Image: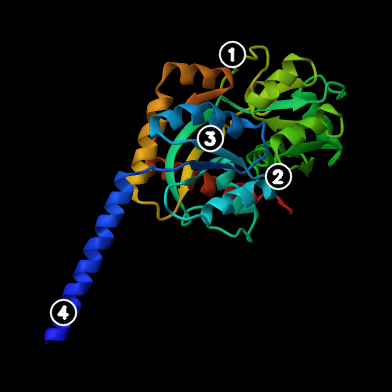
Amino acid sequence: MKLINTLGALALCVGALSSMAQTSTTRDYPNHPIKMVIPYAAGGPMDFIGRTLAPRLSQALGQPLVIDNRAGAGGAIGTDVVAKSAPDGYTMLNTSSSHASLPVVSASLPYDPIKDFAPITLVANSVGFVVAARPDLPVKNLKELLADAKVNPGKYTFGSGGVGNVMHFAAEFLCTSADVKMTHVPFKGVSQSLNDLVAGRIDFVIGAPTAVLPLVKSGKLKALAITARKRWSELPDVPTIDEAAVKGFVYTPWYGFWFPAGVPAEQVARMRTEVNKLLEDPDIKRAFAEQGFTTVGSSSAEFSKVIADEIAMNKKLATRVDFTQ
């Protein structure tokens, strides 16, 4: 009996010490640099979001926040890096609504988009993606493009940041809505798809405004439409897809931050609080607006619902589209 009591007391002591250590770790968080993984090549919308927030977030947290671009497999490689990272609050994921489309098109993902992550906050919504074509594409507008694609299935090519990437889903959603067939050309990131578009090797992309706008303004691309409910102030002459060709069409991507699952709730809350404070800053709001984003900031529960709803919508689309690897 004495041995049992002794073992019980020892177990309680070990448990108390473990709890104290965890509390101390949480209280001291962060005490070394934090890595922000962006699962796409540099130059895309997540890159802008990360590099805009990182310096201010570093100041607020008192530790450097290091950007790590891990491109490949439509975002799956970098996302998997975060999923398999230690749940200590020192590795975070910065990605888009592609997080909710990849699992729909790939049954072999090495991670679960829900179970393997702890949502921090919904950071921003896009003002809409821009349908941007090579300047010499022999159509005047989106209506003409879709009309020609209707009678010439597979004639036109569109690029994306990879199979299952949000750009891919936006274009497939347009094709399905307009009842046309066009050919998907996946790349490792937004910048690579735009490089090939400018070079004339593909016909168009439906891309993030932050990446497309400079190329449109310089005349290297022509904007045919925008996927949002209303026109964008930076391109006021460019119609919505609803106005131009497909009634009722709307597609507005979102962007957010995650930790790997298992990160202590206190650390998730700390990061969410600091990020959401920044998203209320007028200078940050202005910088985001200039690049085609509206800042959001949300609770983990609100963000979780956004992710679940998006996955459900994408599953419906996937039943009508042949997503091939």
Are the residues tagged 4 and 2 within 8 Å (C-beta)? Answer: no
Using the image, determine if residue 223 lies above or below residue 183.
above
Q: Which residue is mark 2?
A: 162
- Image position, residue 55 (x, y; %): 49, 28
- Label 3 – label 1 distance at C-alpha: 19 Å
Nearer the N terminus, badge 2 or badge 3?
2
Mark 4 or mark 1: name the one nearer the start of the chain: 4
Q: Which residue is at 39% across, 43% downward?
A: 31
Q: CA distance from mark 2 to mark 3?
A: 17 Å
What residue lies at 54% left-to-right and 38% top-to-bottom?
66
| Upstream in sequence: badge 4 or badge 3 | 4
Residue depicted at 58% across the width and 22% down the height: 292
Q: Decide which of tag 4 and tag 2 comes sooner along the chain.
A: 4
Amino acid beneath label 3: Trp
Would residue 309 be found to the left or right of residue 264 on screen? right
Q: Looking at the picture, which amino acid does disc 1 mark?
A: Ser
Q: Which mark is residue 94?
A: none
Circles 4 and 3: CB distance less than 8 Å? no
- Mark in front: 2 vs 1: 2
Say left or right for 115 vs 291: left
N-term-proximal mark, 2 vs 1: 2
